[in-house]
Structure formats: structure tokens, C-alpha cells
Image (cartoon, rainbow, N blue to C red):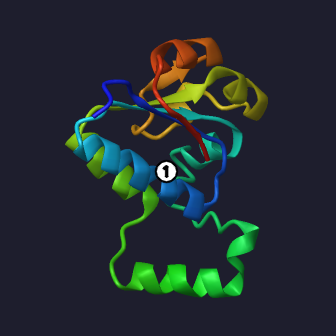
Amino acid sequence: MDDEPLNIVLFSGTEDRLQAAAVMASGAAALGRKVNIFLQYWALDAFRKDRISASLGLAPEAGERGATLVREAAAAGQQPWHATLRVAKELGEIDIQACSLSMDVLKIEEQDLDALVDGVEGVTAFYLNAGDGHILFI
């Protein structure tokens, strides 16, 4: 297994894409791989204390069929993306950082963020922490 971290740039704030990122992070953590998640714009907005449990909608391509399937999965017990990330952080080393530029643009203060977020950093710090690891953009 690669010793380099898995790095996820999380831009989208839709529930399906947030869930995809949470599942990818969880899988990597379960395998003992370090994960760095860099929150930008609409993903960052989803990590606000007052929005983290809100319904955030799905990507447009999901359509009504996708919305129905997601509702059925939730009714069957699939946990929401933020719960998946909390469990993933218990499994392994996952560092979630808010993008400082996105914080400025969206006028978000660090105290506005859920405890899942470990801190705030710039893009240069993200790249330095990423090393030679893979970078996923979601």
C-alpha cells in the first residue's frame, strides 16, 4: 500500500458528493492510509455547524430517480455523510482543513464550523501535506 496520503479536494456541497468523499475517506482510513481533506466553497459551507445536518440536495444529474433512491437508502439506515466522516475519523488518521480563501469569500469564521473540521489552511499548505499522494477532486 502506498505510504503517501490520499488527498481529497472537496468542492461540492451536495449530499451525494459529500457522501462519496466520506466513503472514499473511510475506506482509505480503514486500510491505514492517512487522508487529507481540503474543503472549498460549497463543501465548506456544508460543514457549518448550522448546516451540517440540513438537507443539502443532490447533484443535478441525480434527478428524481436518484433522489428517490437516496431517500430509500436513508430510510433503510444508511447514515448521512457527516456521520460516515465521524466514524472514519475514529478508524484512522483523517485531517479536515478549511480553505482560508473560501473562508474569506463566504465570510465564515472558524467558530462557525462543525468540530469535524480540524483547522484552516491555504492551498500551499494543502499541497505540502499532500506530498506525492493522489489527489481526488470532488
Q: Position of residue 50 (x, y in %)?
A: 55, 50
For label 1, the residue is 21
Determine whether 120 is above or below 78 in the image.
Answer: above
Q: Residue at x 41, y 28 (%)?
A: 118
Percent across and percent down for residue 98 are 56, 29
Residue 32 lies in what quarter of the image? top left
In this view of the protein, which residue sits in the foreground, 100 or 21?
Answer: 21
**Residue under the point 74% across and 34% down:** 106
The one nearer the camera, 76 or 61, is 61
Count the numbered circles shown: 1
Q: Is residue 121 left or right of residue 64?
A: left
Question: In what element is the residue under mark 1?
Answer: helix
Against 85, residue 98 (above or below) is: above
The residue under the point 69% across, 65% down is 59
Residue 52 at x, y percent in the picture:
51, 53
What kind of residue is marked 1? Ala
**Position of 110 compared to 24: left or right?**
right
Q: Which quadrant holds the N terminus?
A: top left
Indicate the position of residue 124 as horizontal and vertical percent values: 61, 12
Quick one: which residue is furthest to the front in this view?
1
In this view, 108 is above or below 19 = above
Residue 76, quarter of the rendered image: bottom left
Q: Decide: few, some or many residues near mark 1? Use Cα within 10 Å; few <14, some 14-19, many ≥20.
A: many
Judge by depth and name the residue closer to the eye, 56 or 85: 85
Which residue corresponds to the image point at 57% horizontal and 62% vertical from the top-left? 15
Identify which residue, 6 or 66, lies in the foreground. 6
Quadrant of res 48: top right
